[in-house]
Image: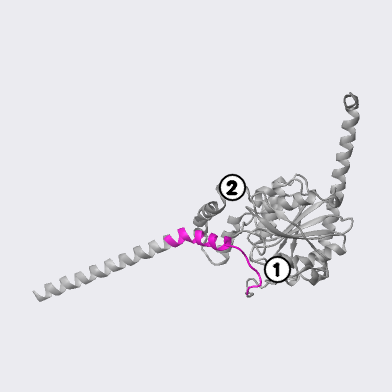
């Protein structure tokens, strides 16, 4: 009897442990499923949360948090009133030159550097005869907005600046160039694809799509490939909730670059960039083989040597490459203007008798 009772007790203990093990396994599996499902939504919320306010404590990942003034670079700037079609007031600073060779609109990354670091570019550009406009996109600094657009919404920001430029007599027949880095590069590409009045594009460390950038970041943090494949559609869905399905489907840099229509394009990337991998520029090359490409033997995500935006002229290789490209842009613009004038003259001559009547 005692032996039978002990056997029953032992059997009940085994059953209890099995139930606990089963419950623990189910709980662990449920937790994993919930983590997989909700992680993209949490991540998208984190990276789109604004506004980005600088001069906070620099971190290892985001050390470039200073806010500069034009006077720090011995420049005089003009603050220009920019208001977008969808109602956002934006901070924008213009550095003028006499008889500008081109006007360059600068766009920066998501968290750093602040757009004011590009006063270093503006000074160097002015010394070489180019005007500059530093545009602080929505959700950053003194511009309005609480959501960072990641390239989906900032097309309206760029369009507002382009409309301002086209109203200024000093920029008549002057090439309009977009230059952006990382997220700013993606913004520049999407705006370039949507705004035909822009004459040229310089995209540095730009991602091919937001989904690509997020999934690559997951890989870099050790997330297994099978989980990355599961997460991709969830990331896309999370982005659609924030920006709308149409924007997420259509405003992808990899698609918008196909709208270049023979306009000059210059892609720059670093070979060992750990934030936006070299695979992105390779995909752009497949989408637009006619563009100009330069891959630096570097790991600098922000391209410039040591991310030194305040003394950009010291990076002579970078400066020479940019100036060479801008020379090509000017020649292309002259050719377009010449063809347009010749075409107008031809049409006027052909239909002269009708015009007289």
Identify the residue at image location x=31%, y=68%. 21
Graded by Cα atoms within 10 Å as few (under 14), some (14 to 19) or many (20 or more), the crowding at tag 1 reads: some
Residue 350 in the image: above or below residue 328: above
Residue 54 in the image: above or below residue 174: below
Residue with the mark numbered 1: 300
Residue 124, picture quadrant:
bottom right
Q: Nearer the viewer, residue 305 or 200?
A: 200
Please provide percent x and percent y for residue 36: 46, 60
Residue 47 falls inside the magenta stretch: yes
Residue 212 left/right relative to 200? left
Q: Tell me where the magenta segment starts and ends, as one range.
A: 34-56
The answer to whether any part of residue 55 appears in the image is: yes
Residue 197 left/right relative to 29? right
Return the residue found at the far left. 1
Residue 112 in the image: above or below residue 185: below
Q: What colour-coding does the image apply?
A: one colour
Q: Nearer the viewer, residue 2 or 259?
A: 259
Element under disc 2: helix
Q: Nearer the viewer, residue 173 or 75?
A: 75
Residue with the mark numbered 2: 249
Element under disc 1: loop
Question: Nearer the N terminus, badge 1 or badge 2?
Answer: 2
Q: How many marks?
A: 2
Identify the residue at image location x=70%, y=48%. 193
Residue 108, picture quadrant:
bottom right
Please provide percent x and percent y for residue 316: 83, 67
Identify the residue at image location x=54%, y=67%. 222
User: Dividing the image into 4 quarters, which one contains the C terminus?
Assistant: top right
Q: Nearer the viewer, mark 1 or mark 2?
A: 2
| Magenta stretch: helix, strand or loop mostly | helix
The answer to whether any part of residue 284 appears in the image is: no
């Amino acid at each position: 009897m005692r032996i039978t009772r002990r056997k029953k007790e032992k059997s009940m203990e085994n059953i209890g442990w099995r139930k606990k093990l089963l419950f623990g396994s189910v709980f662990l599996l449920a937790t994993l499923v919930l983590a997989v499902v909700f992680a993209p939504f949490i991540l998208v919320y984190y990276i789109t949360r604004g506004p980005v306010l600088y001069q906070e404590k620099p971190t290892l990942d985001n050390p470039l948090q200073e806010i500069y003034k034009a006077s720090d670079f011995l420049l005089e700037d003009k603050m220009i009133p920019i208001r977008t079609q969808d109602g956002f007031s934006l901070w924008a600073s213009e550095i003028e030159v006499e008889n500008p060779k081109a006007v360059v609109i600068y766009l920066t990354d998501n968290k750093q550097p602040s757009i004011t670091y590009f006063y270093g570019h503006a000074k160097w550009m002015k010394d070489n005869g180019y005007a500059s406009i530093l545009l602080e996109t929505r959700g950053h600094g003194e511009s309005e907005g609480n959501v960072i657009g990641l390239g989906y919404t900032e097309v309206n920001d760029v369009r507002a600046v382009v409309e301002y430029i086209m109203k200024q007599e000093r920029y008549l027949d002057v090439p309009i160039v977009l230059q952006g880095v990382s997220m700013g590069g993606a913004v520049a590409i999407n705006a370039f694809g949507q705004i035909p009045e822009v004459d040229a594009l310089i995209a540095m460390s730009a991602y091919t799509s937001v989904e690509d950038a997020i999934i690559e970041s997951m890989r870099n943090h050790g997330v297994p490939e099978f989980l990355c494949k599961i997460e991709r559609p969830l990331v896309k869905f999370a982005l659609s909730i924030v920006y709308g399905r149409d924007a997420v489907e259509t405003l992808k840099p990899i698609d918008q670059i196909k709208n270049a229509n023979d306009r000059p394009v210059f892609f720059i990337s670093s070979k060992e960039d750990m934030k936006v991998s070299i695979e992105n520029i390779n995909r752009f090359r497949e989408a637009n083989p006619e563009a100009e490409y330069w891959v630096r033997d570097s790991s600098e995500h922000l391209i410039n040597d040591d991310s030194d935006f305040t003394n950009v002229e010291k990076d002579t290789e970078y400066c020479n490459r940019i100036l060479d490209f801008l020379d090509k842009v000017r020649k292309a613009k002259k050719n377009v203007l010449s063809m347009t004038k010749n075409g107008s003259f031809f049409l006027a001559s052909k239909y002269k008798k009708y015009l007289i009547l």
